[in-house]
Amino acid sequence: MPPSNSSSLRRLAPLTLLVGLAPGAWALTVEFNYDYDASGFFAPGSDARNALEAAGAFFEAAIGDSLGAIESGQGAGGFYTAFFSNPSVFQSGTTLQTESVANFAVAADTMRVYVGAVDLDPFSTGTLAVAGPGAYIVNGGSAYRDAMVSRGQGANQSQDDIRNVDDLTNQTANDFATWGGFMSFDIDRAWHFGIDTLPIGSQPDFLSVALHELGHVFGLGTADSWNNLVSGSTFFGPAATAANGGVNPSLQNGGAHWAAGTLSSVADYALSYIPNAGETQETAFDPNLTLGTRKLMTELDLAGLEDLGWEIVEPVVEPPPVVEAAQVPVPGAALWALAGGLGLLARRSGRGQGG
Ligand SMILES: [Ca+2]
Ligand SMILES: [Ca+2]
Ligand SMILES: [Ca+2]
Ligand SMILES: [Zn+2]
């Protein structure tokens, strides 16, 4: 699917994913939509949905952009129709069925992602998932079209900031915005859905794959603003180059991923997951996942998102609590109880946690 603009993620109860966030860091919501989950792969309360939402929470935490609302209709000033691949239905051959939603609307600061599962063997027997940003048609005056396509992003908040006027000679895209997109997962795999546990044997790790596919929805390898930084098999984004030790990262043939085997260090947002933040790991956006292993987002992956236009929020790691020795002498049992009560209050106040 061609790039489009908008997606939203659901705000999650804070999972173990995060250690701490800067104020305002919850700007983005990744709103997964299950209307096209024909098989019930992501049934409510399922481990699959849980792992998917954990992947969404990572992007919610990492991205700080504020996106304008997408509206459609007479009162809105124009009409917006969204297009995306049905994540559960093949149309023919290797094409998923195209869906369209007229009078489309998405709340501000929200990215919507349609998810589902189907046997993806028509792509290739090795395919774990496919994904992409959604497409759209916007009809209205130029102010409406600029607002709907850019969602307030870009140097001039215009549609030309998001989509190249001409891919060969007028590469105007300098940022990315979209209503969201779709992600489809291979339905007949022995997926590992655990968040706090690692896959074993030949299990594909769902969290790893969901993070990778969300990256495509967010423009990695798909946005015009990404493609404008690609020349041959080299990526010229400044943030990614800095994250890669000052060397322009190499890309897979075609430019949609980092070169196979590219390494970086696990990003701080993953502190409570395994592998741990700071560990060297194959990037999430190399082209493939070794079965039985996990890959989280790395610093290079985040830098790629930054280069294509997303504001990356620096995670704030809270300092460890100050542990103070008890100050109250303990002359007898009655005072013990009192001291214990005071200690409890102190703990609740969040300071002076007793040993
Ligand atoms: Ca399959
Ligand atoms: Ca790989
Ligand atoms: Ca931006
Ligand atoms: Zn990919």
Image (cartoon, helix red, strand yellow):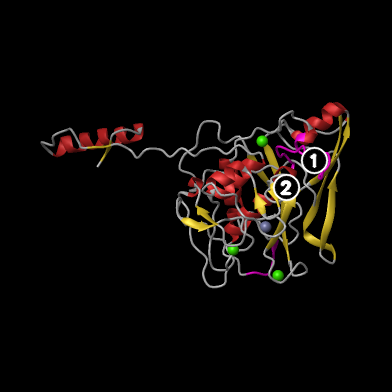
Residue at screen point 57% across, 36% down: 26
Q: Is residue 231 visible?
A: yes
SS at badge 1 = loop
Q: Which residue is mark 2?
A: 227
What are the residue bounds of the magenta stretch? 161-189
SS at badge 2 = helix
User: In the image, which disc is placed on residue 164?
Assistant: 1
Kindly report the secondary structure that dominates the magenta region of the rendered protein: loop
Residue at screen point 65% across, 52% down: 234
Q: Position of residue 342 (x, y in %)?
A: 26, 32
Inspect the image, locate mark 2, and give the three-letter code of the amino acid beneath it: Asn
Q: Is residue 299 left or right of residue 98?
A: left
Kindly indicate the quadrant of the structure image that contains residue 229. Answer: top right
Q: Position of residue 63 (x, y in %)?
A: 60, 39
Magenta includes 18?
Answer: no
Q: Is residue 11 visible?
A: no
Question: What is the CA distance from the residue labelled 1 to the residue labelled 2?
Answer: 10 Å
Q: Earlier in the sequence, mark 1 or mark 2?
A: 1
Kindly indicate the quadrant of the structure image that contains residue 322. Answer: top left
Whether label 1 touches label 2, CB < 8 Å:
yes
Magenta includes 163?
Answer: yes
